[in-house]
Amino acid sequence: MRIATYITGHGYGHATRSLAVLRAIRVRDPDAWLAIRTMAPERFFREALAPPLHIERVQIDVGAIERDVLFTDPVATIAALRELHSREEEIVSREVDFLHRQRVDIVLSDVPPLASEIAHRAGIPSVAIANFTWDRIYEDYPGSTDLVARIRGFYAKTTLGLEVPLGHPITAFPRKESIPIITRHPKAPREETRAALGIARDEFVVLVVLRGGELGSRSMAPTPRGVRFVSFSPFHADRVLIPGPDWQDRFPDLVAASDVVFGKPGYGIVGECMAARRPLLHLPRGGFAETPYLIEWMDRLMPHSRIEILEAASPRFYDLARDSASSGFVWPEVRLNGDGVAAEFVWKLLVSCKTSE
C-alpha cells in the first residue's frame, strides 16, 4: 500500500489523529509506504513511524489564524485563504505530479479541502477523517461566501468521509461513515511513569498543555506543598518538572500519570484525557466555531471545568484543580478504537478500487 496523507498544520488533534491511523495501517501492512505532507513538525512523525517514510513540509490550507492564544482572527484568516487559493492551480498540479511519480494508491486527509481535489485530479480514491470541516468553520467569517462554496466543492469530491465524534454533524462528504473516537492511549502504568519522573505516589500532579507564554507574563500563585506541575514549555510556577524530549511520544503516559490536565479544549487533548480517564481544566476559546460542539460532547463524556485566565493565576486555581479531580464523575463506556476502524475502511476501499480496475 502506498499512501499520501495531507494533514492541516492547525492544532494538535489533527496530527495525533493521523498518526494513530497511520500506525494502525502499519499493523495491517508493515511495509506500507507512507508520505506525510503537512506544516506540522516533521519530528512528531519521524520519531513515531519507521521507514519507508517520506515527510515533506507542504502547505495546502491555512487553518484558522489566531489573534492570540485564545481567539481567532477571521479577517486575517480569510485574507490568507484568498492568497492560498490564488496559487491553487500551481499547488494542485504540483501535488498531482507528486502522487503520480510516487505511484500513490490512496490519499488520506485530516482535513485540508484541497486534498480531495488533488486526489480527484490524480484519479485515485481519497479518505477524509474529520470531526469538523473547514466550510463550517469559515461560513460565519466576513467575506467568506465564495470561498466556502469552493471548499464545499472540493469536499464533494471525497471518495469516503469518516466522521469521528467531538465535533459538529458533517454534511460535506457525499459518502460518509461514522467511526469511534481516534486517540492515543497510555502504555505504561501510572506508578511506573511517576517513578521514572521522580514523582511521589501521593503528589497531586497538574499536567500543563499550554504552549510557552499562553498565560502571558502571569505567574501561578505559590504552589502548595504536595502539588507539582509537569510541562514541556517554560511555565511561570513553582515546582515545575520539564520532561525530556523522549517523553513527547509518551505523552499519553504523562496524562495517565497526572491528576488533572490544564490547557485549552481541543480534539487531541480531550481524546487523550478520555483514554486515561483524567479531568480537563480548560481556558475559554473565543472564535473557534468547533468549540461549542466539543464542549457539548465533553459535558456527556468526561469531567471538565472552565477556568478564566485570571483565575488560573490565583490561589483559587488549586481548589478548582482538586475539585475537578475528585468530582466523582462516572465515566461512560465509550469506544476509543477509531484508528483501527479507520484503517479497516482505508483497506477495504483500496481493495475495492483495485478489484474494479
Image: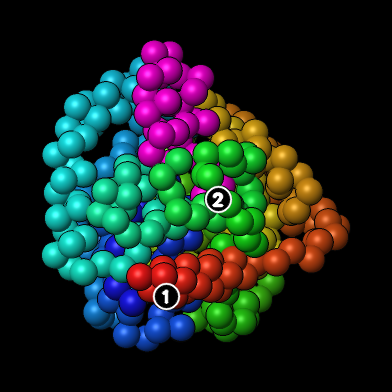
Q: Residue furthest front?
A: 357
Image position of 252 (left or right of 235): right
Nearer the camera: disc 2 or disc 1: 1
Seen at 32% across and 44% down, the residue is 117
Residue indicated by mark 1: 355
154 inside magenta stretch: yes
Seen at 43% across and 13% down, the residue is 142
Q: Which residues are magenta?
A: 129-155
Answer whether labels 2 and 1 touch (C-beta < 8 Å).
no
Percent from the top left, x then y, of residue 356?
Answer: 41, 70
Q: Earlier in the sequence, mark 2 or mark 1?
A: 2
Percent from the top left, x then y, of residue 114?
Answer: 32, 42
Distance between the alpha carbons at the discs numbered 2 and 1: 20 Å
| Quarter placement of the C terminus | bottom left
297 inside magenta stretch: no
How dense is the environment of label 2, judged by Cα within 10 Å: few (below 14), some, or many (20 and up)?
Answer: few
- Residue 192 falls in which quadrant of the image? bottom right
Image position of 132 (left or right of 331): left
